[in-house]
Amino acid sequence: MNAIDRNEPIDHRDVIASLTNEERGRLTGKSNGPGLIQFSCHLGAIVILGTLIAARVPFWPVLMLPQGILIVFLFTLLHETVHRTAFETQWLNDAVARFCSLAIALPADWFRYFHFAHHRFTQDPDNDPELAFPKPETMRQYIVHVSGLPVWLGHFKTLWTNATGRCRDSYVPPKGLPKVRTEARAMIAFYAVVLLVCLYFRSTLLLYVWILPAVLGQPFLRLYLLAEHGRCPFDANMLENTRTTFTNWFVRKLAWNMPFHAEHHAYPGVPFHQLPAFHVLIERHLKVTEAGYVRFHEKYIDTLR
């Protein structure tokens, strides 16, 4: 990494420009191996817990919470796959994105347009689509936000709006409208078939291994995601408008290394498994960090009206 004068103000572009060609090549190198191993562990844990719940082992209802956390944190894998950095093979990224999309009712193609606009206009009040959903400013808003209920309603509304051809989101280009419409209709058809099969067999299995766990787990994803940009300045510098949260190994694995979020925004082409190495290179330049999610929320709650 070429030297940067620490006395001069720098932004993420200066940091990227300071990387040598060798460092860039190493940091942006994609690989199927790390993604397949982590996906196998993540999916395997869901299958194991789901099997235990289905078998109704002693105290099985307690298992619905960790099951739900694993399910909703497939969002972080969906995020990685829409960047097509989870795996080197493109069809593998797209296939896993579809799986995650169905698991959490968030359409992958639509989310790609939404998320790329978020990257282009991070913390821009006029253009960042994430800011269309204001961060909580009162304790009541905070509780509602963390409950996750507005998120589920938003997902279903997006599906219905896209399926009926009424998508008017500015970040979805005209050529993308047929794609998001077809995607939403296919997802609704899938859910309808699953529902009919469950009704035919009078089975409540998916209610306990998928739906209720996801509802229970969503608050933990909300708590995690709020730290990414909550209370960060409205600034174009990715080293200032995005927070990296220092946490334990388990949370980093569960979230596919996205706690290194300022690093991700500074250089989105870096795959999840290279973010720790990129963090080592730029840690001294990060402007907004926090020592854990509990500490972040303690500070956030102190700012509520």
Image: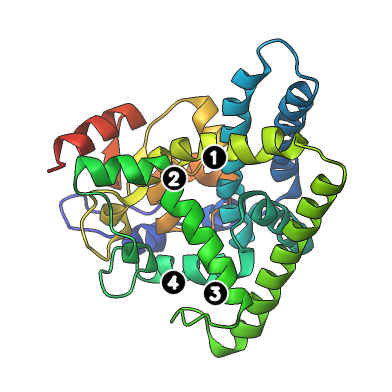
CB atoms of marks 1 and 2 within 8 Å: yes
The residue at which mark 4 appears reads as: 117
Is disc 1 surrounded by few (<14), some (14 to 19) or many (20+) residues within 10 Å?
many
Which type of secondary structure does the marked residue at label 2 adopt?
loop
Look at discs 4 and 3 and give the one toward the viewer.
3
Report the residue that reaches farthest toward the right: 201
Q: Residue at x 53, y 35 (%)?
A: 217
Along the polypeptide, which appears first: circle 3 or circle 1? 3
Along the polypeptide, which appears first: circle 4 or circle 1? 4
Q: CA distance from mark 3 to mark 1?
A: 22 Å
Q: How many marks?
A: 4
Is disc 4 surrounded by few (<14), some (14 to 19) or many (20+) residues within 10 Å?
some
The residue at which mark 3 appears reads as: 161
Check disc 1 and give the amino acid type.
Val
CB atoms of marks 2 and 4 within 8 Å: no
CB atoms of marks 4 and 3 within 8 Å: no
> Which image quarter: residue 47?
top right
Q: CA distance from mark 3 to mark 2?
A: 20 Å
Look at discs 2 and 4 and give the one toward the viewer.
2
Which type of secondary structure does the marked residue at label 4 adopt?
helix
Q: Residue at x 22, y 38 (%)?
A: 300
Residue 266, percent across and down? Answer: 40, 57
The residue at which mark 1 appears reads as: 215
Residue 244, percent across and down? Answer: 36, 42
The residue at which mark 2 appears reads as: 148
